[in-house]
Amino acid sequence: MKFLLSRVLSTTLFTIVFSVPSQAQALLSNEAKINTIISQMTLEEKVDMLHGKHMFSSAGVERLGIADIEYADGPFGIREEMEPNSWKSLNLATDSATFFPTGSALAATWSPEMAYAYGRGMGIEARLRGKDMILGPAINIQRIPTGGRTYEYFSEDPLLSGFLAVAYTKGCQETGTAACLKHYALNNQENYRGFVDVRISPRAMNEIYLKPFEMAVLEGDAWGVMAAYNKVDGKWCSDNEMLLTDVLRKRWGFPGIVISDWGGVHATSAVVAGMNVEMPGNRFMGKALLDSVKAGVISDAVIDQRVRELLRVRLLVQPIPAEKANKEMTAKPEQLKTAYEVAKRSIVLLKNDGVLPLNLKRVKKIAVIGDNARCKQALGGVGAGVKTLREVTPLEGIREAIGNGAEVIWAQGYPSYGAQERFKRVSPQMAPDRKLLAEAVKIARKADVVIFVAGDNREIETEGSDRVSIKMPQGQNEVAKALAAANKNLVTVIVAGGPLELETVRDASKALLISWFNGSEGGTALGDVLTGKVSPSGKLPFTFPIKLKDSPAYATGSYPQQLKGSDQQGDIFVGLVNREKNDRSQELIAPYAEELLVGYRWFTTKKLPVAYPFGHGLSYATFEYSNLTATPNAEGIRVEFDLKNNSSIDAEEVAQVYVSREQSALERPALELKGFQRVALGKGEQKRVSILLRRNDMKDWNAAIENWQLEAGQVEVHVGSSSADLRLSQTCTIN
Ligand code: BGC
């Protein structure tokens, strides 16, 4: 194993010799100083560091000049300032931040460069606010289409998630702000996230679910990790030696800190398993921990080791004195620009019968229909949101892009779904509102083009509970059909963070786009794509199934969503108090029965149809792929091909490389993503694209030897524009 701690660890936790990747050396550069600090600390001072001081801070040691650690949500904008011990806003005038496109939007760019700029922007704004660590990126794999936090997470694919996580982490940490990878690990559902007990094979765990974390630790050099709420193999993630010590610290050589999710510690023994900070309270790692050490149940060496890891981060991240924080507005134009650059690359064109881009010579009257056209998405639902100065709505963005070129009229079309409805547990699957519908149809009839802005919002997709369905909410299917009957030029824009059932709107619409929860400049980017200033280039980071029941965790019945005898769909506020006493995890086992076949791996292996495949996304340009070579070398497989923009418009394309291994001795998914690249091509331009399928990413997890292993033999390399649009193939042999 590469990054193995020396055996010394098990006997004396104090003198550790790491064999770690060079980037992590930064964290290890103050060991001598740390020895001195620890030798001067009392036990009380040490324990004081190991739990929350306030809702978003943990203590330092004032006497020794060690500052508190200040944390901030993350992951898609720096959260506003709250009272020290509540979730109540301080209503400051300076804490409005840039609202970055949420995780699934960033993932749809398939661009590590964009993820780097995004992380950097988050890091810069965190520093202005005096924050040391952002609680992000959020990188769990999207296992179920209904997952409440799908909008925060990246992808159903580990490599796409991993590359983005590495770049985000680097971008953030290069500004001096620590990143905190969350939620480690296997937090793939929100319903009962506080109890659900995941059972999974080591191979699926390592190849699919841990891979993004492994990459972000080893290649991104993340300084922080947040333990998830759920259980794995019968043990809370916060108290899970296998995850926190064996994998994270020993195998990956992680030298940084593990903090709990809020209220996610359930026993003092968490500190032994590898937990550094219980957040936000001190129920288990405060007095109880002090007593345990004094009674000799927990050793001083364990405490010293956890304090050492904390100090590594504390000494590396420059503290910002309170009087210097929050002195100027958090949001800066530079970050707004990044938010725009991400948003414009994230929009996915699913279908286009030629109606887009809008031809403003012919289109003189545009009907924009939909509550979502004016809805803002920075806040809403449970969990982190962003107080922001600027969020361009779809309607505003369309108006801005059209200018005086055409008349734009708006109608709501379908009823709103807000916080009140969520609190009252009103299903978003409501009937259409006849009055709103009639008004929309009337406007649609008179227009040259209708832009129907549909989809979810942040009340429907929320932390703390999964969606019950992926059907279009608020009677939107009926609205789409009525609009199509009134006007054949229907363009539908889906605002959402996760998949929806699109059959009805697809059939009703001439063009269909996904524009995500797309941040401060989401509307601007949408306007630019609709009018052709920008050619769409986003690609789906997850499959859109035809029906929910087709998707792997539903098809295998291995997503436990309902607790017997309870009408609760989720655990909205995770039961911070006495969750241990109410632990019903035995009734909530999630056997990850689909194994490796998550997302497109399932559909391609089982040869099942989907609505829109992983990696799908059209352009206004057409691209030609040719002249593929796939050459194995010491680093992996070097894949090269020509990519030509055959159109008269500048455009970007995300070229994707998948492999299959027909002669493998192992059971494998039919297709696996092993490389990708976003390529910018001027009109008519051709480039030779070169992508390395890295040797490490070609390896499989061998449970018997608890390590990665490369299976030598034949590999079929496929290059294309999506997982279902493979244009070139070539076979080669790796050793
Ligand atoms: C979420 C975390 C978040 C924390 C603090 C928890 O409910 O799961 O992602 O960072 O709250 O807001």
Image (tube, grey):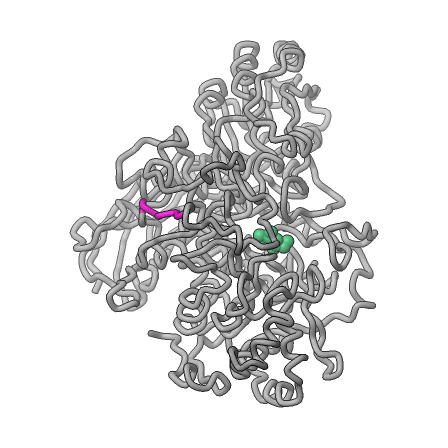
Residue at figure coordinates x 66%, y 49% from the top left: 337
Task: Please report the bounds of the magenta region as a residue range.
Answer: 589-594
Q: Percent x, y for residue 654?
A: 44, 45
Nearest the viewer among 57 and 211 is 57
Q: Residue 553 is drawn in which quadrant? A: top left
Instruction: Give the quadrant of residue 459.
Output: top right
Residue 92: x and y in percent read 82, 53
User: Where does the image place residue 484, in percent across and percent down from the top left?
Assistant: 53, 14
Q: Residue at x 22, y 61 (%)?
A: 711
Quadrant of the frame with the N terminus = bottom left
Work out which quarter of the rendered image holds the C terminus and state it.
bottom left
65, 294: nearer the viewer: 294
Q: Is residue 444 above or below residue 17?
A: above
Residue 113 seen in render: no
**In this view of the protein, can residue 420 be seen by the observer?**
yes
Residue placed at 56% from the left, 20% from the top?
475
Nearest to the observer: residue 71 or residue 614: 71
Q: Is residue 487 covered in magenta?
A: no
- Tell me where residue 662 appears, x and y as whole percent: 18, 48
Residue placed most toward the observer, 16 or 713: 16
> Number of labelled discs?
0
